[in-house]
Structures are given as C-alpha cells and as structure tokens.
Amino acid sequence: MPKAHITTANGMKIVIEGDTAEVAAVVNQIQAVHSPAKRGRRTNLVGETKRDQKKRESAKDHITLLKEEGFFDKPKSLSEVAKKLEESGHLYPVTTLSGIVLNLVQKRLLARVKREGKWMYGKR
C-alpha cells in the first residue's frame, strides 16, 4: 500500500496511506494549501523555496565548512582558499572571497595575520 511522509514548512509531520490515487490527491491538496501565494514561489514538500535552497550553497557556507574540516589549522592565503574551493567544484574569484573572509574575521570565526606582506587566514 503506498505511503507518503510529508513535513510542512512549520514542521508538522503528516503520514498518508491509501491507494496511489488517494495518496496523490491528498498530497496535491496539502501542497496547494501550503504553497505561498506571492509571485508564484514554489516550495518542495519541506516548505523550502528555490531561494532557500540556494542560500545553503553560498561561498560563506563553503568557507565555514572548510574551517570545520580543519583547512584553516595552518594560515592560508586567499588564493589557497580559492584553489581549495575550486577543487570541490565551487568557482569564486579571489576578489569575491576577500570580502567574505574579512566578514568571517570580523565575526571572529577566522583569524587574520600578515606574513611577508600578505594577509593569511587561519582558525581562531
């Protein structure tokens, strides 16, 4: 017997059991009720819009993940950060990364030191 598990945007969990047509009908009704009316934004079953999905994949998030993985245990230059991100398929120019990394320094998530005339970034 087909079964559907749905979690709405506000965290409500719904389990639907029945034949295929019944489950499909109820899922369509739930989606219609929980879909935002503004400018036709579409949501997935967990209530995320495409904008929310893209937010999770920002350069700041990728750099924070590198910090958690220990990449910044030794100080790195911006070009080294860009190269490491490029290895995982995320292409960002150094000029874009400079502002993002500086923001992380200001939030005290990374440290910044000057070595041989070059700014290096490491863990705090």
Image (cartoon, rainbow, N blue to C red):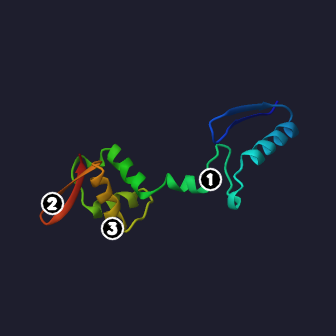
- Mark 2, other Cα within 10 Å: few <14 / some 14–19 / many ≥20: few
Q: Secondary structure at mark 2?
A: strand
Q: From the top left corner, tell me how far across and down residue 43 is, in percent.
A: 67, 51
Q: Secondary structure at mark 3?
A: helix
* For residue 115, side relative to residue 77 (left or right): left
Q: Amino acid at mark 2?
A: Lys
Between the residue at mark 2 and the residue at mark 3, the CA separation in whole angstroms equals 17 Å
Q: Earlier in the sequence, mark 2 or mark 3?
A: 3
Q: Residue furthest front?
A: 38
**Which label sits on residue 118?**
none
Residue 83 visible here: no
Q: Amino acid at mark 3?
A: Val
Q: Quadrant of the C terminus?
A: top left
Q: Earlier in the sequence, mark 3 or mark 1?
A: 1
Q: Nearer the viewer, residue 16 or 92?
A: 16
Q: Residue at x 37, y 49 (%)?
A: 64
Judged by depth in the image, the label closer to the viewer, 3 or 1, is 1
Q: Nearer the viewer, residue 50 or 65?
A: 50
Disc 1 target residue: 49
Displayed quadrant of residue 69? top left
Displayed quadrant of residue 86? bottom left
Q: From the top left corner, tell me how far across and down residue 98 is, in percent.
A: 31, 64
For the residues bearing labels 3 and 1, Cβ distance under 8 angstroms: no
For the residues bearing labels 2 and 1, Cβ distance under 8 angstroms: no
For the residues bearing labels 2 and 3, Cβ distance under 8 angstroms: no
Disc 3 target residue: 94
Between the residue at mark 3 and the residue at mark 1, the CA separation in whole angstroms equals 29 Å
Q: Quadrant of the N terminus?
A: top right
**Which label sits on residue 114?**
2
Q: Nearer the viewer, residue 101 or 87?
A: 101
Q: Residue at x 56, y 52 (%)?
A: 52
